[in-house]
Amino acid sequence: MKGKNYHALFGKDKFKKIKDSHTLIVGAGGIGCELLKNMASVGFGHIDIIDLDTIDVSNLNRQFLFHKEHVGQSKASVAKEASMILNKDIHVVAHHGNVKHPEYGINFFRKFDVVINALDNLDARRHVNRMCVLADVPLVDAGTSGLKGNVDVIIPHVTECYACRAKETPKVLPVCTIRSVPSKPDHCIAWGKALFQRMFGEVDDTNVLSDVTMTNMYDAEWATRPGELGITILDKLFTDDIRVACESVENDMMWTQGAPTPMYIPRAADIKAVTLENMDDTLVLTTEGAIEVFNASFSRLYQATHDQTGKKHTPIEFDKDDILCMAFVSSVATLRMTVYHINAVSPFTIRSVAGSIVPAVCTTNSAVAGITVHRTALIITEGRPTSNTDPAARSSYVTFNATRAVSAPFPDPPSKTCVVCARKATQLTVVEGKTTFGEIYDLLKREIKSDELTVENAGNVLWDVEDGGVDRNAIYSEVGIMDSHVINVIDDVDGVEYAFLTIVHHTGPLEIVGPLFPTAVVEEPETLEGKRPVGDDDVLGDDSDLEECSDAESLISLDG
């Protein structure tokens, strides 16, 4: 029995609680793999793990449940199999899918004693936070960024939730997105910087493009023809590789802007020479201009780093203030944005992004995962915290490059202005495919005892007392109401509003379950003060707060 040592550590009764517990891990990347390994070793009896991604070669240096033969397979499925080898007495369920999909609604989250976040993007992280608050399930949020990490315990309506504090726009980027499915300029810029390091920097096996094959740059035949070599590489990266990427995908759903378009690359002799020193970095490069800038910068960089035999003799580091470095990264990033139908940005913007990418550190992932499992075990064995000063509710911040490696402050109570947890929601059950909006509206009027109600869903007004609204005979889904949606109902007579959590049931009945929670109608504040740590591990990123963590106050959880 793998958990025998933990059996002695926790004691018979508490270990039984762990063995009987049901936990959900969202994300099977760097942190997720460490979590699953630890939880299998301890003996958590029932674990579900969900991840949308498949395994990439670049994952193998930090996601230790995966091996070369697993490339291309579902992360969740492979992680499940690996964990059950560690402990055959546990039960693991793998979900290869998007946690935001309707099938993972409130009722899905309610099955678990604790949910653990190890995600790689803010949007999904916010979604899981919202679902846990609505389902009233404890959430442990884990994230890392370089040598910094965070673990936040979120107990709905007891501690602040993930949405209680405003967060800056994320600047950390998940590796898998950079390599395979870029959707933002930042993704292409990170790719361009990795390509620069791959071509002209020191050998680095952790580079996200370290396994990318290209024309042999180290052959003597290219030493006197760097311009032709550069165009050959461009043709491979933006024509051949893009065709392969399109052919390897069965449908276009994975491309947020549509499938990428292979690019025509002209012959080296047809490319106009340009002077890099005269570039205006505030102007976005055209495709033709980007190819010209690439041709000029590549030739000079190649000659500076390679000898007459084609061997790299003087590797250089990327410097955002170096004209050649930035010309190269700006050109390839712009070309990648073009083929992926992303609106290109100026070299000035590219420089600001390329200057602040944070690498993943396995040690930080491991430390954060260990603390996360400890917090999860405390919640299960000691009971759900009832106060934000309960020891089990402590947050933990890891900073290996500071005097104190780990700090564990108590979290704040919920924010009274939080759009997620400031109000409690009453359950509204509807009959799948049958209940009409009119039936819902009439039920609300009876329960609230008011004929003057305004109904809002996802920011849209469905019914207004004076102007009316949607077709009363329309099925709930036809007006945008879905399972796990929260609809806001305002009593215009008493000046109060109510939140109703929609639960779709196969047979119904249409009913309101539980007490109503009226709150005074107030205008939302213009800003929320404060930032909370976030972070994750598996990301290249900035030092701020995207999906990883960056500083003790603005970490973000990311795990690709």
Image (tube, helix red, strand yellow):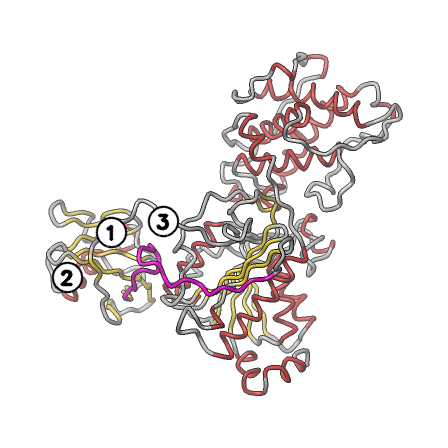
Residue density around tag 1, few if under 14, some if 14–19, many if 20 or more, within 10 Å: some
Q: Nearer the viewer, residue 243 or 453?
A: 453
Q: Which residue is denoted by mark 1 in the rendering? A: 456
Q: Is residue 546 above or below residue 199?
A: below
Q: Which mark is residue 528?
A: 3
Residue type for callout 1: Glu
Q: Mark 1 or mark 2, which has the lower sequence index? A: 2
Picture coordinates of residue 339 (x, y %)? 57, 30
Q: Mark 3 or mark 1, which has the lower sequence index? A: 1
Residue type for callout 2: Lys
Q: CA distance from mark 1 to mark 2?
A: 14 Å
Inspect the magenta stretch and tell me whether residue 409 lies in it: yes
Picture coordinates of residue 471 (x, y %)? 19, 49
Left or right? Give the position of 170 relative to 511.
Answer: right
Picture coordinates of residue 45 (x, y %)? 57, 76
Q: Are marks 1 and 2 in contact (CB under 8 Å)?
A: no
Q: Mark 3 or mark 2, which has the lower sequence index? A: 2
Inspect the magenta stretch and tell me whether residue 30 lies in it: no
Q: Magenta stretch?
A: 406-426
Q: CA distance from mark 3 to mark 1?
A: 23 Å
Picture coordinates of residue 107 (x, y %)? 40, 67
Residue type for callout 3: Leu
